[in-house]
Image (spheres, rainbow, N blue to C red):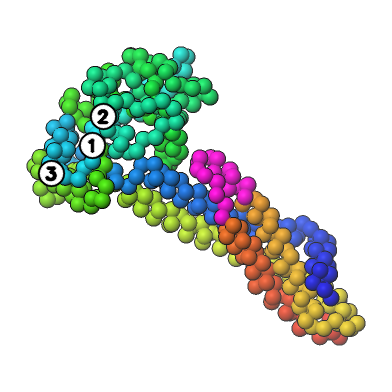
Amino acid sequence: MTLQTLFREAINALRLNLLRSALTAFGVIIGVGSLVVMSAANSGANKLVERQIADQGTDALAVRAAKVENALRRGAVVVLTDQDANAVRELVPNIQYLSREVYSKVTLVAGNSSWITEYWGVDASYEQVWGVKLSEGRFFDEAEVRSGAKVIVIGATVARKLFGTASPLDQTVRLGTIPVRIIGVRRKRGSFGGVDEDNFIILPIKTARAHIPNSEMSTARQLSLIDMKVSPGANREKVKQDVLALLRERKHLRGAQEDKLDVIDLTQMVELLNTTQSTLNRLLLATAAILLLVGGVGIMNIMLVSVTERTREIGLRMAIGARRRDILRQFLAEAVTLSVVAGLIGLMIGLAGSVLVARLVDWPLIIPPLGAAAATLVSVSVGIIFGYLPARRGAGLNPIDALRRK
């Protein structure tokens, strides 16, 4: 019997019990679909992280007072100020660019539309520190920072919420109580760690301090962050330690009080994200493996039932000349056909799910060929492994006993 004939008969046998075959294949379908979605999600997330690192670079650091995000900590409050930023700029070597930053929430109004977003009041050097790239317009310069010019750069989400598909460049919007002009739109960045990286506006720090009340700031010169870019070739870790040592000295922090200053290091954030993602992947892999195991056991049970139901057929085939290996191949072909069909359906569902997930979380859609190939190989393996025992049982029947059995 040729291989083609073997699988054609297997398909006919499975069609006779279509509902039972479909229910049996359900576990394999879900398992393979999960493998494909997980593989695509992992690739898409990695690509997004690589792209954002390329956008921002790995030489940027930011220091903030722990009090800002950890208000429940006990002890004296640490506040970063303009004087601290100036000290870091003057005394710590190997800092190429430095920018002060204040941030909070604000309502932006354009015509009849309004949108609550986060504002970042910064120096002009912020553009170099974080490698800001614009899709339209320009970033503000140092003269506009010194004069407190009423200009802003907006993120892609803010542009979409207020202006739809129209260009927001040179439009005037109301920021709190003052009119400001949009001079630039930052290139779309997507989500990072579940946060929309396009929902913000950037404006000169002097403008922000003069026109946007910030209840978190206890003094006029208080800062939310000190952003800095390490000089090319310098040791980032050494620069980080030098900055912390200087600020601890200025704030009279000793020993256990060191944790009142936090350093935002993009490299560490990426490592943390990768660790979290790796843990999630292992969890999903375990879930997919369990589903495939359940699907495989289901196939084995159904094939055992099929062998029992078709005992007389097996006896008859043997009586007219079929060898034991023909019976073995027949039932093994049915098990493999069932698992491969289930695997292909799971693959299609997985592809559709990958597209849906990529659109929902706004990251690149990447379906690695290796993942799809692995899913198909796994489904074939499930059919062979879990179909072998029933096929062997059928092939081991005595023809006379099989013919006598009702």
Q: Secondary structure at mark 3?
A: helix
Q: Residues within 10 Å of mark 1 (few under 14, many from 20)?
A: many
Going by the numbered disc 3, the residue's amino acid type is: Leu
The kind of secondary structure the magenta stretch mainly shows is helix
Q: Tag 2 or tag 1, which sits nearer the N-term?
A: 1
Q: Secondary structure at mark 2?
A: loop
Q: CA distance from mark 2 to mark 3?
A: 22 Å
Name the outermost residue toward the front: 232
Magenta segment, which residues? 351-368
Q: Residues within 10 Å of mark 2 (few under 14, many from 20)?
A: many
Do the residues bearing badges 1 and 2 touch, measured as CB atoms within 8 Å? Answer: yes
Name the outermost residue toward the right: 320
Residue carrying label 3: 246
Residue carrying label 1: 98
Image coords of residue 372 (percent x, y): 61, 58
* 75 versus 400 height, above or below: above
Q: Residue at x 39, y 21 (%)?
A: 182
Camera-side residue: 207 or 352? 207
Query: Is any part of residue 34 visible from this angle?
Result: no
Q: Which of the 4 image quarters holds residue 261?
A: top left
Going by the numbered disc 1, the residue's amino acid type is: Leu
* 199 versus 10 height, above or below: above
Going by the numbered disc 2, the residue's amino acid type is: Asp
Camera-side residue: 120 or 95? 95
Quadrant into which the N terminus falls: bottom right
Quadrant into which the C terminus falls: bottom right
Q: Which mark is residue 205?
A: none
Residue carrying label 2: 123
Q: Nearer the viewer, mark 2 or mark 3?
A: 2
Count of numbered labels shown in the rendering: 3
